[in-house]
Image: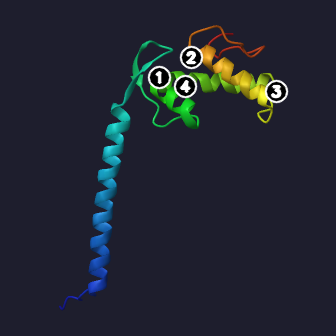
Amino acid sequence: MSRRKRAPLTDMLLAKLVSSDHAFCIALSIYEETSMSQTVFCRKYQQELDALPFPPLPGKKGQEIQATVSQKAWQEWQALQTRLINEKHLNMLDPAAREYLMEQMERFLDNQETDQAEGYVPRDQP
């Protein structure tokens, strides 16, 4: 039985695929290590918790939030923000509505009293 020879181009393509897969695996492993090991002293919970992987808002404000707010606090804020937008029928094109949400966000992250969605009942309460 004779073995069929592969064309040199095929060998080159296979080598590129293998090396690119290897590079992808290395990049993914570095990303997982850095994203999993990053923590931040959360201003809401006053303890070290998982950091946000990227700034949640553009500019200086987004960088400040990334440096001082945990993923847990940000996810909780997003849930409250969604309830406020829906229940209060906020129009996000309205600058006053955006300013209102920014004020509520600051209050929430600083553990101050925030507005609540009227009629909202948490799932764990009847």
Q: Amino acid at mark 3?
A: His
Q: Amino acid at mark 2?
A: Leu
Helix, strand or loop at label 4? It is helix
Q: Amino acid at mark 1?
A: Thr
* Disc 1 and disc 2 in contact, CB within 8 angstroms: yes
The residue at which mark 2 appears reads as 109
Task: Name the one closer to the observer, 116 or 64.
Answer: 64
Residue neighbourhood size for the residue with mark 4, other residues' Cα within 10 Å, grouped as few (<14), some (14–19), many (≥20)? many
Residue displayed at 56% across by 12% down: 110
| For residue 99, side relative to residue 2 (left or right) | right
Q: Which of the two labelled residues, at mark 3 and mark 4, occupies the earlier sequence position?
A: 4
Alpha carbon separation for disc pair 1 and 2: 9 Å
**Residue 95: where, in percent of width, then height?**
78, 30
Helix, strand or loop at label 1? It is helix
Residue neighbourhood size for the residue with mark 3, other residues' Cα within 10 Å, grouped as few (<14), some (14–19), many (≥20)? few
Helix, strand or loop at label 2? It is helix
Helix, strand or loop at label 3? It is loop
* Disc 1 and disc 3 in contact, CB within 8 angstroms: no
Query: In which image quadrant can residue 123 be found?
Result: top right
Q: Amino acid at mark 4?
A: Trp
The residue at which mark 3 appears reads as 89
* Disc 3 and disc 4 in contact, CB within 8 angstroms: no
Residue at the outermost top position: 113
The residue at which mark 1 appears reads as 68
The residue at which mark 4 appears reads as 74
Residue neighbourhood size for the residue with mark 1, other residues' Cα within 10 Å, grouped as few (<14), some (14–19), many (≥20)? some
Alpha carbon separation for disc pair 3 and 4: 22 Å
Q: Which of the two labelled residues, at mark 2 and mark 4, occupies the earlier sequence position?
A: 4
* Disc 3 and disc 2 in contact, CB within 8 angstroms: no
Query: In which image quadrant can residue 3 be found?
Result: bottom left
| For residue 6, side relative to residue 72 (left or right) | left
